[in-house]
Amino acid sequence: MKTLLATLILSLACLCNITAAQTDGHPIENLDGQQFVYPGASVHYVESQIIDESYELRVSLPAAYTQDSTADFPVVYILDGQWDFTVAADINGKLIYDGMIPPVIVVAITWAGENVDYGAKRQRDFVLTENVQIPGSGGAENFLAALEQEIIPFTEILFRTNGHRTLMGSSLGGLFTTYAMLEKPELFDGYVALAAPYDVEQAYFQNRMAELAGTDELRKVRAYVGAGSYDLNRAQVVEMAAQLRMSNLKGLRLKKHIISGFGHASATPAGYSHGYQYVFKRPKLKLPASALEQFVGSYELAPGYPPLEIVAGLFKLQLIQPGLTLDFYAQSETEFYVLGSDIELEFIPGEEGAMTMLLKQSGGTYALIRTE
């Protein structure tokens, strides 16, 4: 009780001091705060000749972009950047930190200008077919052309990209993402579509999947479709995933995910987080014991440093220190990674059985030599 009273008295004293300072003619500055700018972000504009529209691109670069001036990176394009830029960029940064995805450039697309009617712009750009119940709809074909011919080339001229592209969108943005996947499957490597109202374009989807049935045009595509368990569009998402699977789209890798406990908009952070990981999912090779055993041993960074022990497990290597065991999975015959941490191992054989292990963590690389 004394502590509570003391806290209350202190709070009242602070309030009185603020009031006194203001009435004494010495107002405290910055009570209204200052505009927040997302760290490391930049804003660029593309003037579309195809649509006669100015698009704003909000860009977040990974830390590795400035650390290595020769490296190039995948790009994730986010629709509805006015709402989802900071969400997508934050998730991206956290997943990179944990080593769950590679460093990625985030480009969030929105409409430039003041007092933008986002609802009207979305209905025009994200819906393919003119629909009397959706005023202004029917411009998705033009927006896809602007994306392919204007926005993507602009991004790839301005930044160091490696050609791997992903498109993400939610609600009408998810509808457009699925349309883009079927209409231009080669344009992106990954597609993440959330909470899409697929019944708006059901005729198009049925016809297009019939055209693609039995082909391998989507053989390089990884697609994630999802919705919250409370989303009214959930049944449509489930049905779309079923139709995609029944269409015999050879090589398409598809994941359907109903996200428990979320609604239409609130599922976006979880959906994007899972979508990122599915699109950039690493291989987990099942190397035989003979391939793993060649790396077993004790590795030392320098005399006086405690060695790191590498042992072979079932389809994995294990790094062992007192009180710590990490499981490493193979992404190639000499490269291994751990789930949930930004730690990788690469083994370089030398002459007469010598072996160097490169331990890579958070942008740093450390060479350890096998001593046993």
Image: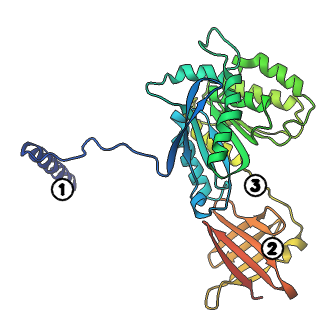
Kindly report the distance in space between the C-alpha atoms of the residues bearing marks 1 and 2. Answer: 60 Å
Corner quadrant of residue 205: top right
The residue at which mark 1 appears reads as 2
How would you rate the neighbour count of disc 2 (Cα within 10 Å): few for under 14, some for 14-19, many for 20 or more? many
Q: Position of residue 15 (x, y in %)?
A: 16, 46
Which kind of residue does numbered mark 3 sit on? Arg
- Compare residues 112 and 257 and report the one nearer the observer: 112
Q: Position of residue 203 (x, y in %)?
A: 78, 16
Q: Which mark is residue 312?
A: 2
* Among the two numbered marks 1 and 3 on one chain, the one whose residue lies closer to the N terminus: 1
Q: Which mark is residue 282?
A: 3
Image marks 2 and 3: residues in contact by CB distance under 8 Å? no
Quadrant the C terminus occupies: bottom right
2 or 3: mark nearer the eye: 3
Q: Position of residue 54 (x, y in %)?
A: 55, 29
1 or 3: mark nearer the eye: 3
- Compare residues 217 and 175 and report the one nearer the observer: 217
- Colour treatment of the image: rainbow
Q: Position of residue 52 (x, y in %)?
A: 59, 23
View extreme (right): residue? 214
Which kind of residue does numbered mark 1 sit on? Lys
- Compare residues 54 and 332 and report the one nearer the observer: 54
- Compare residues 90 and 106 and report the one nearer the observer: 106
